[in-house]
Image: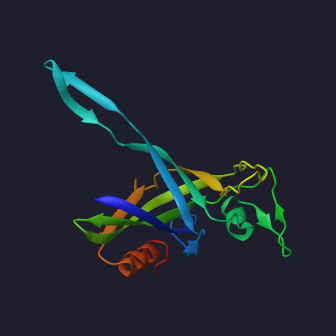
Amino acid sequence: MARIGLKNFKYSELDENEKVKEPKSLGKAIDCKVSLELNSAELYADDGLAESDYTFNKGTVTITVDDDDDTILAPLLGHEVSEDGEVIRKDTDIAPYIAFGRILTKIVNGVYKYKVEFLSKVKFKDTMPDEKTKGESIEFTTPSIEGSVMKKADGEWSKAKTFTTYEEASEYLDSLLTATV
């Protein structure tokens, strides 16, 4: 299995009961890095490893998008956007909890597959981008934001499912991010 693509950064705010509201796009996907911190315990008995536990504790997700669209990123970070497009950041701003997903394109035995990777509860935080002047050649820079991955009250922190078509994967991702009645 070779992963060859990444697209469809989508999210949905979570309500006070950790239920999703509605899917929203985060812009075009460039990069996504997830790192996990696991609880680690090992019990040795009779001169060998007898039991082990490596359960999820928390994680970090860092995503890079093609555009730092204020109408998308500011609310995701808990900031206000005025009617005329001005972003207002206050020290009392609180980023909402969200669910976050994306679609990975893979090739398995010469056949394309589409895998949805979904994080059940994330809270993003402000970061300031690196900036530099244009020199002898143009170099693109893109915005990244980092979030904390955590488990919901029921212990769920992630879901994944692979599909044979992109359309099926996209429908599944939207279903994970859409409120059910």
Q: Quadrant of residue 106?
A: bottom left
Q: Residue at x 63, y 60 (%)?
A: 96
Q: Position of residue 41 (x, y in %)?
A: 32, 30
x 46%, y 60%: residue = 120
- For the point 25% across and 33% down, the residue is 52
90 relative to 36, above or below = below
The image quadrant that residue 55 belongs to is top left
Q: Residue furthest left?
A: 46
Viewer-nearest residue: 129 or 174: 129
Q: Is residue 151 left or right of residue 22?
A: left
Q: Is residue 135 visible?
A: yes
Left or right: 60, with 94 as reference point: left
Where is residue 129? Give x, y as percent.
71, 50
Give 179 or 122, whichever is nearer the viewer: 122
- Residue at image position (28%, 28%) is 42
Which quadrant would the N terminus be assigned to in this image? bottom left
Residue 163 drawn at (x, y percent): 31, 73
Q: How are the residues colored? A: rainbow
36 with respect to 83 (left or right) = left
